[in-house]
Image (tube, rainbow, N blue to C red):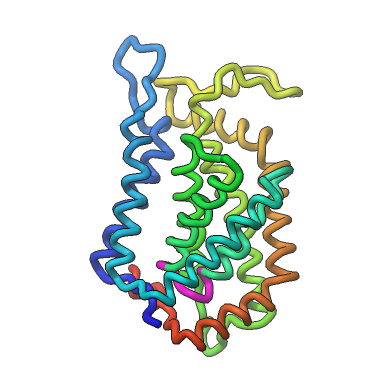
Amino acid sequence: MTAMRIGPRTALTLVLASVAALVMFCWPLLLTPPAGADQVTPPFLFLALLPLVVVVVLAELSEGGMDAKTLALLGVLTAVNGALRSLGAGLAGVELVFFLLILAGRVLGPAFGFVLGVTSLFASALLTSGVGPWLPYQMMCSAWIGLGAGLLPRRSGPRAWRGRREIALLVVYGVACAYGFGLLMNLSSWPYAVGIAVPGHEGSLSYVAGAPVWDNLRTFGVYTLLTSTGSWDTGRAVTNSLALVLLGPAILGTLRRAQRRSAVVPVPERSTVA
C-alpha cells in the first residue's frame, strides 16, 4: 500500500489553506469597520470559502497517492471515529473523536491524519445531525489535530519515542488539542453571541466591532475562561488523556500491525513538510 505523501505542491497548499483558515477564524480581530460604523457585517464569503479550502486540500492530498487499501483504512477509521463521537456527543466535554485521530495521525502520518480529521467530523456530524455553519470550522480544527499528531517527533536524539514516553507525549498533545480546539471554536462563534451574561461577572463579554484588538482579545480571553476552559475544554482534555493512557498502547500496536501488513509506509516527517 502506498502512503499519502506530502509533496512540495501539497505542502504549499496545506500551508496556504491553513493560513486562509486561520484568517477566517480570526477575522473579528483583524477586520476594521468603516469610520462611523457601529457594527461589522460578518464576512459570509469567508464562511463559504472555508469548505472550498478543505476540498482543495483533500484533492491535493489524493493526488499524492491514495490507493484502495489506504482508502479502505481511511473508511474504517472514519466510520469508527464517527460512531465514537456519537457515543459522547460532546456532553460535558466528553469527546471520543480525538484520541483515535491522534493515534492514527501518529502512526500513519500527517497527511492521513489531516484527511481523517476532515472525514471523521463530517461523518459524525451526519450521524448526530450536527451539520451547521460550525461544521467547516470543526473539520478544519480536527484536520490540524491529525496533521499535528503526524508531525510530532519520532526520535529524541538516539532514543525513539516509544512505550510510556510516546504515550506521555501524546497525552500532552491531546491536552493541548483539547484546549486549542475549544479556543478556536469559541473564536468562530463569539462574534455572533449577543448579550452574553455570565453569573459572577459584571460587564459585557460580547464582541465589539471596531474596538482595539487588545480590548477584544482581553474580552474574548475572559469569555473563553468563564464559559468553556474550566468545563467543556477540561472535560475534553481529561477524556483525551484517559483514552490515550488506557487504550493508546493497544491501538498503537494494532495500527502499526495493520501498517506493516498493508505495507503502509509512514509519510516522511517534519523535514518533508516544512
Residue 254 on image: x %, y %? 62, 80
Q: Residue furthest left?
A: 9
Residue 231 on image: x %, y %? 72, 41
> Residue 83's quadrant in the figure?
bottom right
Residue 85 on image: x %, y %? 64, 53
Give the total of numbered labels: 0
In the image, 203 versus 82, the foreground residue is 82
In the picture shown, does residue 241 fall above or below 28?
below
Q: Residue furthest top?
A: 36
Tell whether position 110 is magenta.
Answer: yes
**Image quadrant where one finds the C terminus:** bottom left
Which residue is painted at 49% across and 50% down in the image?
122
In the image, 215 versus 255, the foreground residue is 255
> Residue 96's quadrant in the figure?
bottom right
| Secondary structure that dominates the magenta span | helix
Which residue is painted at 58% across and 70% down in the image?
103
Res. 176 in view: no
- Stretch of the chain drawn in magenta: 105-111
> Residue 269's quadrant in the figure?
bottom left
In the image, 109 versus 33, the foreground residue is 109
In the picture shown, does residue 52 fall above or below 62?
above
87 horizontally vs 125: left or right: right
Tell whether position 5 is magenta.
Answer: no
Res. 136 in view: yes
**Image quadrant where one finds the N terminus:** bottom left
Which residue is painted at 58% across and 35% down in the image?
221
Residue 168 on image: x %, y %? 67, 71
